[in-house]
Image (tube, grey):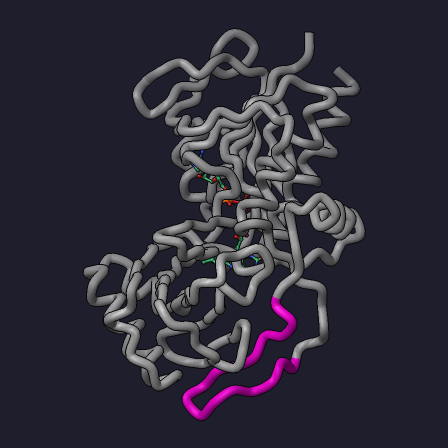
Amino acid sequence: MKTSIAIIGAGIAGITLARALAPSADVTIFEKSRGLGGRMANRRREDFAFDHGAQYFTARSPAFRSVAEDAVQAGHAGTWPRAVLTLTETGLAPDSRPAERRYIGLPGMSGFANGMAEGLHIRKEAAVAALEPAKDGWSVTDSEGQDLGRFDVVISTAPAPQTIRLMPEAFSGHAAMKTVKLSGCFTLMIGLDASLDLGFEAARIEDDVLSWIAIEASKPGRPERMALTIHSRNDWAEANLERDRSEVQTEMLAALKRLLGYDFSNATWLDLHRWRYANVEKAVGEPFLFDDALGLGACGDWCLGNRVEAAVGSATALSELLTKRLQGA
Ligand SMILES: Cc1cc2nc3c(=O)[nH]c(=O)nc-3n(C[C@H](O)[C@H](O)[C@H](O)COP(=O)(O)OP(=O)(O)OC[C@H]3O[C@@H](n4cnc5c(N)ncnc54)[C@H](O)[C@@H]3O)c2cc1C
Protein backbone atom coordinates (compact mmCIF):
# COMPACT_ATOMS: atom_id res chain seq x y z
CA MET A 1 0.00 0.00 0.00
CA LYS A 2 1.20 3.52 -0.81
CA THR A 3 2.25 5.87 2.00
CA SER A 4 -0.59 8.28 2.80
CA ILE A 5 0.38 11.96 3.05
CA ALA A 6 -1.82 14.84 4.22
CA ILE A 7 -0.78 18.32 3.11
CA ILE A 8 -2.30 21.27 4.93
CA GLY A 9 -2.85 24.22 2.58
CA ALA A 10 -3.40 24.56 -1.17
CA GLY A 11 -1.18 27.58 -1.65
CA ILE A 12 1.64 27.29 -4.16
CA ALA A 13 3.84 25.38 -1.67
CA GLY A 14 1.17 22.75 -0.92
CA ILE A 15 0.35 22.30 -4.61
CA THR A 16 4.02 22.08 -5.62
CA LEU A 17 4.63 19.46 -2.93
CA ALA A 18 1.53 17.44 -3.85
CA ARG A 19 2.41 17.43 -7.55
CA ALA A 20 5.88 16.08 -6.83
CA LEU A 21 4.68 13.38 -4.40
CA ALA A 22 1.47 12.27 -6.14
CA PRO A 23 3.17 9.66 -8.40
CA SER A 24 4.66 7.80 -5.43
CA ALA A 25 2.26 8.40 -2.53
CA ASP A 26 -1.41 8.70 -1.72
CA VAL A 27 -1.65 12.49 -1.29
CA THR A 28 -4.58 14.56 0.01
CA ILE A 29 -4.49 18.36 0.34
CA PHE A 30 -6.75 20.02 2.92
CA GLU A 31 -7.52 23.66 2.21
CA LYS A 32 -9.59 25.79 4.57
CA SER A 33 -10.76 28.22 1.87
CA ARG A 34 -13.13 27.70 -1.06
CA GLY A 35 -10.41 28.50 -3.61
CA LEU A 36 -6.82 27.47 -4.26
CA GLY A 37 -3.65 29.58 -4.36
CA GLY A 38 -3.49 30.96 -0.80
CA ARG A 39 -1.80 34.35 -0.96
CA MET A 40 -1.78 34.14 -4.78
CA ALA A 41 -5.34 35.38 -4.55
CA ASN A 42 -7.90 37.19 -6.64
CA ARG A 43 -11.51 38.26 -6.35
CA ARG A 44 -14.19 39.48 -8.74
CA ARG A 45 -16.82 41.98 -7.64
CA GLU A 46 -19.42 43.61 -9.89
CA ASP A 47 -17.33 42.96 -13.02
CA PHE A 48 -14.22 44.36 -11.35
CA ALA A 49 -11.33 41.93 -10.91
CA PHE A 50 -8.55 42.30 -8.33
CA ASP A 51 -5.43 40.29 -7.59
CA HIS A 52 -5.36 41.30 -3.94
CA GLY A 53 -2.40 39.16 -2.84
CA ALA A 54 0.81 38.49 -4.78
CA GLN A 55 1.18 40.84 -7.74
CA TYR A 56 3.50 38.86 -9.99
CA PHE A 57 6.20 36.28 -9.54
CA THR A 58 9.62 35.66 -10.96
CA ALA A 59 11.13 32.28 -11.78
CA ARG A 60 14.90 32.39 -11.43
CA SER A 61 15.60 28.67 -11.00
CA PRO A 62 15.57 26.72 -14.28
CA ALA A 63 13.15 24.15 -12.83
CA PHE A 64 10.56 26.73 -11.77
CA ARG A 65 11.04 28.72 -14.98
CA SER A 66 10.11 25.61 -16.91
CA VAL A 67 6.96 25.16 -14.74
CA ALA A 68 6.05 28.83 -15.31
CA GLU A 69 6.64 28.58 -19.07
CA ASP A 70 4.53 25.39 -19.25
CA ALA A 71 1.76 27.32 -17.49
CA VAL A 72 2.08 30.11 -20.09
CA GLN A 73 1.76 27.50 -22.86
CA ALA A 74 -1.28 25.95 -21.16
CA GLY A 75 -2.97 29.35 -20.74
CA HIS A 76 -2.73 29.34 -16.92
CA ALA A 77 -0.15 32.15 -16.78
CA GLY A 78 0.89 35.23 -18.70
CA THR A 79 3.51 37.94 -18.31
CA TRP A 80 2.95 41.37 -16.81
CA PRO A 81 3.83 44.23 -16.35
CA ARG A 82 6.07 45.61 -19.07
CA ALA A 83 7.69 47.93 -16.49
CA VAL A 84 7.39 48.76 -12.80
CA LEU A 85 7.72 52.50 -12.31
CA THR A 86 8.40 54.30 -9.04
CA LEU A 87 5.75 56.70 -7.78
CA THR A 88 6.56 59.47 -5.31
CA GLU A 89 4.88 62.75 -4.39
CA THR A 90 7.04 64.43 -7.01
CA GLY A 91 5.91 62.13 -9.84
CA LEU A 92 6.92 58.96 -11.68
CA ALA A 93 10.42 57.60 -12.18
CA PRO A 94 11.34 54.87 -14.70
CA ASP A 95 12.04 51.23 -13.85
CA SER A 96 15.69 51.08 -12.82
CA ARG A 97 15.85 47.35 -12.04
CA PRO A 98 17.19 44.85 -14.58
CA ALA A 99 14.54 43.52 -16.98
CA GLU A 100 13.17 40.20 -15.76
CA ARG A 101 10.29 38.05 -16.96
CA ARG A 102 7.41 38.54 -14.52
CA TYR A 103 4.51 36.08 -14.45
CA ILE A 104 0.88 36.34 -13.36
CA GLY A 105 -1.90 33.73 -13.25
CA LEU A 106 -4.69 33.64 -15.85
CA PRO A 107 -7.53 34.57 -15.79
CA GLY A 108 -6.72 35.74 -12.23
CA MET A 109 -3.68 35.19 -10.01
CA SER A 110 -5.04 31.90 -8.63
CA GLY A 111 -5.27 30.55 -12.20
CA PHE A 112 -1.62 29.53 -11.96
CA ALA A 113 -2.29 27.43 -8.84
CA ASN A 114 -5.49 26.03 -10.33
CA GLY A 115 -3.61 24.90 -13.43
CA MET A 116 -0.89 23.23 -11.36
CA ALA A 117 -3.49 21.55 -9.15
CA GLU A 118 -5.21 19.70 -11.98
CA GLY A 119 -5.55 16.01 -11.13
CA LEU A 120 -4.63 16.42 -7.45
CA HIS A 121 -6.87 15.23 -4.64
CA ILE A 122 -7.90 18.40 -2.79
CA ARG A 123 -10.51 18.80 -0.08
CA LYS A 124 -11.62 22.43 -0.01
CA GLU A 125 -13.29 24.16 2.94
CA ALA A 126 -11.52 21.69 5.24
CA ALA A 127 -9.72 23.61 7.98
CA VAL A 128 -7.36 21.29 9.82
CA ALA A 129 -7.57 21.99 13.55
CA ALA A 130 -5.79 19.09 15.26
CA LEU A 131 -3.30 16.29 14.68
CA GLU A 132 -3.53 13.36 17.11
CA PRO A 133 -1.22 10.35 17.19
CA ALA A 134 -2.94 7.34 15.63
CA LYS A 135 -1.71 3.84 14.79
CA ASP A 136 1.63 4.43 12.95
CA GLY A 137 0.58 7.89 11.90
CA TRP A 138 -1.67 10.87 12.53
CA SER A 139 -5.37 11.33 12.80
CA VAL A 140 -6.44 14.66 11.30
CA THR A 141 -9.55 16.52 12.45
CA ASP A 142 -11.20 19.74 11.30
CA SER A 143 -12.35 22.77 13.25
CA GLU A 144 -15.74 21.13 13.89
CA GLY A 145 -14.12 18.04 15.33
CA GLN A 146 -14.86 15.96 12.23
CA ASP A 147 -12.46 13.18 11.33
CA LEU A 148 -10.57 13.95 8.09
CA GLY A 149 -8.70 10.65 8.05
CA ARG A 150 -5.52 8.89 9.18
CA PHE A 151 -2.22 9.60 7.43
CA ASP A 152 1.31 8.22 7.66
CA VAL A 153 2.86 11.67 7.14
CA VAL A 154 1.44 15.18 7.64
CA ILE A 155 3.00 18.33 6.18
CA SER A 156 1.78 21.83 6.99
CA THR A 157 2.27 24.69 4.53
CA ALA A 158 0.26 27.20 6.59
CA PRO A 159 2.19 30.33 7.66
CA ALA A 160 4.54 29.62 10.60
CA PRO A 161 2.32 31.09 13.39
CA GLN A 162 -0.56 28.87 12.20
CA THR A 163 1.67 25.81 11.78
CA ILE A 164 2.97 26.31 15.34
CA ARG A 165 -0.60 26.02 16.63
CA LEU A 166 -1.24 22.83 14.63
CA MET A 167 1.90 20.86 15.37
CA PRO A 168 2.13 18.69 18.51
CA GLU A 169 4.60 19.81 21.20
CA ALA A 170 6.96 16.97 20.29
CA PHE A 171 7.54 18.32 16.74
CA SER A 172 11.26 19.14 16.43
CA GLY A 173 10.61 22.21 14.24
CA HIS A 174 9.02 24.37 16.97
CA ALA A 175 12.18 26.26 17.97
CA ALA A 176 12.93 27.20 14.33
CA MET A 177 9.33 28.24 13.65
CA LYS A 178 9.33 30.56 16.65
CA THR A 179 12.15 32.60 15.05
CA VAL A 180 10.05 33.39 11.96
CA LYS A 181 8.64 36.90 11.58
CA LEU A 182 5.82 37.71 9.18
CA SER A 183 4.32 41.14 8.60
CA GLY A 184 0.82 42.12 7.52
CA CYS A 185 -0.49 44.19 4.63
CA PHE A 186 -3.68 46.10 3.84
CA THR A 187 -4.95 45.91 0.27
CA LEU A 188 -7.26 48.61 -1.03
CA MET A 189 -9.38 47.71 -4.07
CA ILE A 190 -10.94 50.48 -6.13
CA GLY A 191 -13.33 50.02 -9.06
CA LEU A 192 -14.14 52.98 -11.33
CA ASP A 193 -16.80 53.54 -13.99
CA ALA A 194 -14.56 55.60 -16.25
CA SER A 195 -11.14 54.53 -17.45
CA LEU A 196 -8.16 56.53 -16.32
CA ASP A 197 -4.68 56.82 -17.80
CA LEU A 198 -2.22 57.06 -14.93
CA GLY A 199 0.82 56.55 -17.17
CA PHE A 200 1.82 53.15 -15.76
CA GLU A 201 0.67 49.55 -15.46
CA ALA A 202 2.27 49.08 -12.05
CA ALA A 203 4.35 51.19 -9.71
CA ARG A 204 6.27 50.79 -6.49
CA ILE A 205 5.35 53.63 -4.18
CA GLU A 206 7.79 55.53 -1.98
CA ASP A 207 5.55 56.76 0.80
CA ASP A 208 4.92 56.39 4.55
CA VAL A 209 1.64 54.51 4.02
CA LEU A 210 1.54 52.90 0.56
CA SER A 211 3.98 50.60 -1.25
CA TRP A 212 2.40 49.42 -4.52
CA ILE A 213 -0.28 50.20 -7.11
CA ALA A 214 -1.45 48.08 -10.06
CA ILE A 215 -3.89 48.81 -12.86
CA GLU A 216 -5.79 45.54 -13.14
CA ALA A 217 -7.14 46.22 -16.64
CA SER A 218 -3.57 46.41 -17.97
CA LYS A 219 -3.10 42.69 -17.26
CA PRO A 220 -3.78 40.02 -19.86
CA GLY A 221 -7.08 38.16 -19.44
CA ARG A 222 -8.70 40.65 -17.05
CA PRO A 223 -11.97 42.56 -17.57
CA GLU A 224 -11.52 46.00 -19.12
CA ARG A 225 -13.30 47.81 -16.27
CA MET A 226 -10.91 50.17 -14.49
CA ALA A 227 -9.78 48.56 -11.25
CA LEU A 228 -6.86 49.55 -9.03
CA THR A 229 -5.16 47.38 -6.41
CA ILE A 230 -3.10 49.23 -3.82
CA HIS A 231 -0.95 47.70 -1.09
CA SER A 232 0.04 49.42 2.11
CA ARG A 233 3.58 49.22 3.42
CA ASN A 234 4.11 46.17 5.61
CA ASP A 235 5.47 48.20 8.55
CA TRP A 236 2.49 50.58 8.34
CA ALA A 237 0.11 47.59 8.30
CA GLU A 238 1.82 46.10 11.35
CA ALA A 239 1.36 49.38 13.25
CA ASN A 240 -2.32 49.62 12.22
CA LEU A 241 -3.37 45.96 12.13
CA GLU A 242 -6.06 46.19 14.81
CA ARG A 243 -7.29 49.64 13.86
CA ASP A 244 -10.83 50.29 12.65
CA ARG A 245 -11.02 49.25 8.96
CA SER A 246 -12.77 52.43 7.81
CA GLU A 247 -9.99 54.55 9.35
CA VAL A 248 -7.37 52.45 7.58
CA GLN A 249 -9.23 52.84 4.28
CA THR A 250 -9.58 56.61 4.75
CA GLU A 251 -5.87 56.98 5.44
CA MET A 252 -4.91 54.89 2.39
CA LEU A 253 -7.26 56.96 0.19
CA ALA A 254 -5.72 60.19 1.55
CA ALA A 255 -2.23 58.91 0.71
CA LEU A 256 -3.37 58.06 -2.81
CA LYS A 257 -4.81 61.53 -3.26
CA ARG A 258 -1.53 63.04 -2.14
CA LEU A 259 0.39 60.89 -4.63
CA LEU A 260 -1.92 60.87 -7.67
CA GLY A 261 -4.10 63.94 -7.15
CA TYR A 262 -7.32 61.88 -7.38
CA ASP A 263 -9.92 61.47 -4.65
CA PHE A 264 -11.32 57.94 -4.97
CA SER A 265 -13.46 58.03 -1.82
CA ASN A 266 -16.69 57.96 -3.87
CA ALA A 267 -15.52 55.25 -6.29
CA THR A 268 -18.09 52.78 -7.66
CA TRP A 269 -16.37 49.97 -5.76
CA LEU A 270 -14.22 50.24 -2.65
CA ASP A 271 -13.01 47.35 -0.55
CA LEU A 272 -10.24 46.67 1.93
CA HIS A 273 -8.56 43.35 2.70
CA ARG A 274 -6.37 42.76 5.74
CA TRP A 275 -3.57 40.22 5.39
CA ARG A 276 -2.49 39.15 8.87
CA TYR A 277 0.51 37.31 7.38
CA ALA A 278 1.68 38.72 4.06
CA ASN A 279 5.42 39.18 3.93
CA VAL A 280 8.25 37.13 5.45
CA GLU A 281 10.51 39.50 7.40
CA LYS A 282 12.64 36.74 8.93
CA ALA A 283 12.73 33.24 7.47
CA VAL A 284 13.86 29.98 9.09
CA GLY A 285 16.89 29.93 6.82
CA GLU A 286 16.52 26.21 6.09
CA PRO A 287 14.51 24.96 3.11
CA PHE A 288 11.99 22.99 5.22
CA LEU A 289 11.40 21.39 8.60
CA PHE A 290 10.93 17.64 8.85
CA ASP A 291 10.74 15.38 11.88
CA ASP A 292 11.56 11.96 10.51
CA ALA A 293 10.70 10.10 13.73
CA LEU A 294 7.21 11.65 13.90
CA GLY A 295 6.49 11.83 10.17
CA LEU A 296 5.60 15.52 10.49
CA GLY A 297 6.94 18.41 8.45
CA ALA A 298 6.43 21.98 7.33
CA CYS A 299 7.35 24.08 4.33
CA GLY A 300 6.35 27.34 2.69
CA ASP A 301 7.80 30.74 1.80
CA TRP A 302 8.63 31.44 5.46
CA CYS A 303 11.32 28.74 5.42
CA LEU A 304 13.43 30.46 2.76
CA GLY A 305 12.33 34.07 2.36
CA ASN A 306 9.33 35.91 1.03
CA ARG A 307 7.84 35.49 -2.46
CA VAL A 308 6.28 32.78 -4.54
CA GLU A 309 9.58 31.33 -5.68
CA ALA A 310 10.71 30.82 -2.07
CA ALA A 311 7.52 28.83 -1.40
CA VAL A 312 8.16 26.71 -4.50
CA GLY A 313 11.83 26.22 -3.55
CA SER A 314 10.89 25.13 -0.04
CA ALA A 315 8.25 22.65 -1.23
CA THR A 316 10.54 21.26 -3.92
CA ALA A 317 13.35 20.65 -1.43
CA LEU A 318 10.99 18.82 0.96
CA SER A 319 9.52 16.78 -1.91
CA GLU A 320 13.03 15.59 -2.82
CA LEU A 321 13.66 14.36 0.73
CA LEU A 322 10.24 12.70 0.98
CA THR A 323 10.62 11.02 -2.42
CA LYS A 324 13.92 9.47 -1.28
CA ARG A 325 12.23 8.37 1.95
CA LEU A 326 9.33 6.82 -0.01
CA GLN A 327 11.71 5.00 -2.34
CA GLY A 328 13.65 3.63 0.63
CA ALA A 329 10.46 2.56 2.40
C1 LIG B 1 -0.31 41.40 -0.28
C2 LIG B 1 0.71 40.43 -0.77
C3 LIG B 1 1.56 40.79 -1.81
C4 LIG B 1 2.51 39.89 -2.28
N1 LIG B 1 3.26 40.21 -3.37
C5 LIG B 1 4.09 39.28 -3.91
C6 LIG B 1 4.74 39.51 -5.14
O1 LIG B 1 4.52 40.54 -5.79
N2 LIG B 1 5.58 38.56 -5.62
C7 LIG B 1 5.79 37.37 -4.97
O2 LIG B 1 6.52 36.52 -5.46
N3 LIG B 1 5.16 37.12 -3.79
C8 LIG B 1 4.32 38.04 -3.26
N4 LIG B 1 3.65 37.77 -2.10
C9 LIG B 1 4.02 36.56 -1.34
C10 LIG B 1 3.44 35.28 -1.95
O3 LIG B 1 2.06 35.42 -2.13
C11 LIG B 1 3.76 34.14 -1.00
O4 LIG B 1 5.16 34.08 -0.80
C12 LIG B 1 3.32 32.77 -1.51
O5 LIG B 1 2.07 32.84 -2.15
C13 LIG B 1 3.29 31.84 -0.31
O6 LIG B 1 2.83 30.57 -0.69
P1 LIG B 1 2.65 29.42 0.41
O7 LIG B 1 2.05 28.26 -0.28
O8 LIG B 1 3.95 29.24 1.13
O9 LIG B 1 1.66 30.02 1.50
P2 LIG B 1 0.11 30.45 1.36
O10 LIG B 1 -0.15 31.01 0.02
O11 LIG B 1 -0.17 31.30 2.55
O12 LIG B 1 -0.66 29.07 1.47
C14 LIG B 1 -1.01 28.48 2.70
C15 LIG B 1 -2.39 27.86 2.53
O13 LIG B 1 -2.71 27.16 3.72
C16 LIG B 1 -4.09 27.32 3.97
N5 LIG B 1 -4.29 27.02 5.39
C17 LIG B 1 -3.80 27.69 6.47
N6 LIG B 1 -4.18 27.10 7.61
C18 LIG B 1 -4.91 26.02 7.25
C19 LIG B 1 -5.58 24.99 7.99
N7 LIG B 1 -5.56 24.97 9.33
N8 LIG B 1 -6.24 24.03 7.31
C20 LIG B 1 -6.28 24.04 5.94
N9 LIG B 1 -5.68 24.99 5.19
C21 LIG B 1 -4.99 25.96 5.84
C22 LIG B 1 -4.35 28.77 3.59
O14 LIG B 1 -5.73 29.02 3.37
C23 LIG B 1 -3.51 28.88 2.33
O15 LIG B 1 -4.26 28.55 1.16
C24 LIG B 1 2.66 38.62 -1.64
C25 LIG B 1 1.79 38.28 -0.60
C26 LIG B 1 0.83 39.15 -0.18
C27 LIG B 1 -0.13 38.73 0.90
Of residues 203 and 63, the one drawn nearer to the viewer in this rendering: 203
Residue drawn 46% across and 37% down? 35
Residue drawn 73% across and 20% down? 24
Q: Is residue 24 left or right of residue 76?
A: right
The span picked out in magenta is 81-96
- Location of the C terminus by quadrant is top right
- Location of the N terminus by quadrant is top right
Q: Horizontal and vertical percent for residue 15?
A: 60, 36
Q: Is residue 164 above or below residue 185?
A: above
Q: Horizontal and vertical percent for residue 295?
A: 59, 22
Of residues 326 and 225, the one drawn nearer to the viewer in this rendering: 225
Residue 19 is drawn in which quadrant? Answer: top right
Residue drawn 75% across and 45% down? 70
Residue drawn 45% across and 85% down? 88
Residue 85 is one of the magenta-drawn residues: yes
Q: Is residue 236 left or right of residue 113?
A: left
Q: Horizontal and vertical percent for residue 239?
A: 30, 66
Q: Horizontal and vertical percent for residue 137?
A: 54, 14
Q: Is residue 13 above or below residue 304?
A: above
